[in-house]
Image (tube, grey):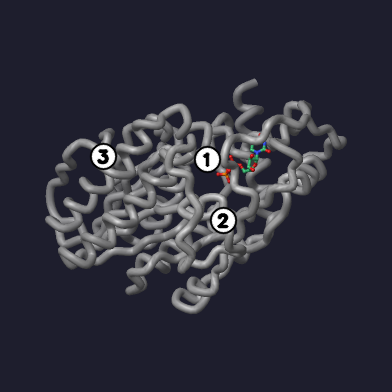
Amino acid sequence: MRILVTGGAGFLGSHLCERLLAEGHEVIAMDNLITGDVANIEQIRNDGFLFIKQDVTNYIYIDGPLDAILHFASPASPVDYLELPIQTLKVGSLGTHKALGLAKAKKARFLLASTSEVYGDPLIHPQKESYWGNVNPVGPRGVYDEAKRFAEALTMAYHRYHGVDTRIVRIFNTYGPRMRINDGRVVPTFIAQALEGNPLTVFGDGTQTRSFCYVDDLIEGIYRLLMSDCHDPVNIGNPSEMTILDFAGIILKLVGRPEEILFKPLPVDDPKVRQPDISRAKELLSWEPVISLETGLKRTIEYFSARARHRE
Ligand code: UDP
């Protein structure tokens, strides 16, 4: 297949490009590099790979046929989308519209990267795809949550009205090599703090929960979804849930540092709990995560410490 990955120079986009190339597909990565980085794709040596620097909120022109479009462009960490609120709304709305229009014109399959944030601060736990969510549209996180909810609605409209062959993946907290060290998310932040010998900044009292999925597991789930014929949203994430305070303890132990925590205020509308119900992915895709938190974190810590050594 000839596949376009928007956000192809980002954390997930770059892992996806590599996986698609390894499966023998031709890949075009598109990115405006506001949160992506060409360093994430510079190791790719493959004649079937092309990078185009473009903002997908503008008209997208691609020469020749396309068999699939994976729409992964968007700021994705709370710090990023608070700093880039308008771009976040635009890429989820206008960018999704352009990418769907291209899919329709090329008769290409379309896969939307959606998010567990569509569930907001959930009142149902764990979260099943049938739950409609609890999102504050006018809160600071609304720029991301509502953009992704709109993107899902637009994707289903193109599917129902234009017959576009669509997929929607709802991605839960994912971590691994190539996260930006300063993207503000808990995994790179805690690892950087632990490696530098600084206290770990736990927001609130640390009783809020998250469930962390290693990037390779997530990419496997997305690839299976792409190859399936499922048009309804599918949660992909790791159901192993923990409090952020316990997570801080795990990072400190793996890095070999004593317990030192600095409590900071909880960001507005920070979800209190989050855990994917992955029954649908298990049933339809025969998928479940296989990489343990310890294995995934060790690989991620190694990535960040190698980069720190490189900078010295
Ligand atoms: N968090 C924290 N300290 C940090 C960064 C994040 O305690 O330095 C918390 C944050 O408040 C949230 C959780 O960790 O409850 C996960 O945050 P992240 O930004 O990784 O993603 P989210 O799941 O909120 O989208």
Which circle, 3 or 2, is nearer the viewer? 2
Quadrant in which the N terminus appears: bottom left
Viewer-nearest residue: 155 or 303: 155
For the point 13% across and 47% down, which residue is it? 63
> Dot 3, how many residues are within 10 Å of its Cα: few (below 14), some (14-19), or many (20+)?
many
Question: Is 278 placed left or right of 233 in the picture?
Answer: right
Q: Residue furthest bottom?
A: 283
Describe the element under mark 2 as helix, strand or loop: loop
For residue 58, which quarter of the picture? Answer: top left
Q: Which residue does the numbered mark 3 point to in the structure image?
A: 56
For residue 229, which quarter of the picture? Answer: bottom left
Mark 3 and mark 2 residues within 8 Å of each other at the beta carbon:
no
Looking at the picture, does residue 249 appear above or below residue 296? Answer: above
Coordinates of residue 276 in the picture (x, y in percent): 57, 62
Mark 1 and mark 2 residues within 8 Å of each other at the beta carbon:
no
Coordinates of residue 46 in the picture (x, y in percent): 34, 48
For the point 72% across and 54% down, which residue is it? 242
Look at label 2 and name its amino acid. Pro
Which one is earlier in the sequence, the residue at label 1 or at label 3? 3
**Mark-to-mark CA distance, 1 and 3:** 22 Å
Q: Which residue does the numbered mark 2 point to in the structure image?
A: 122
Looking at the picture, does residue 17 appear above or below residue 233? Answer: above
Which one is earlier in the sequence, the residue at label 1 or at label 2? 2
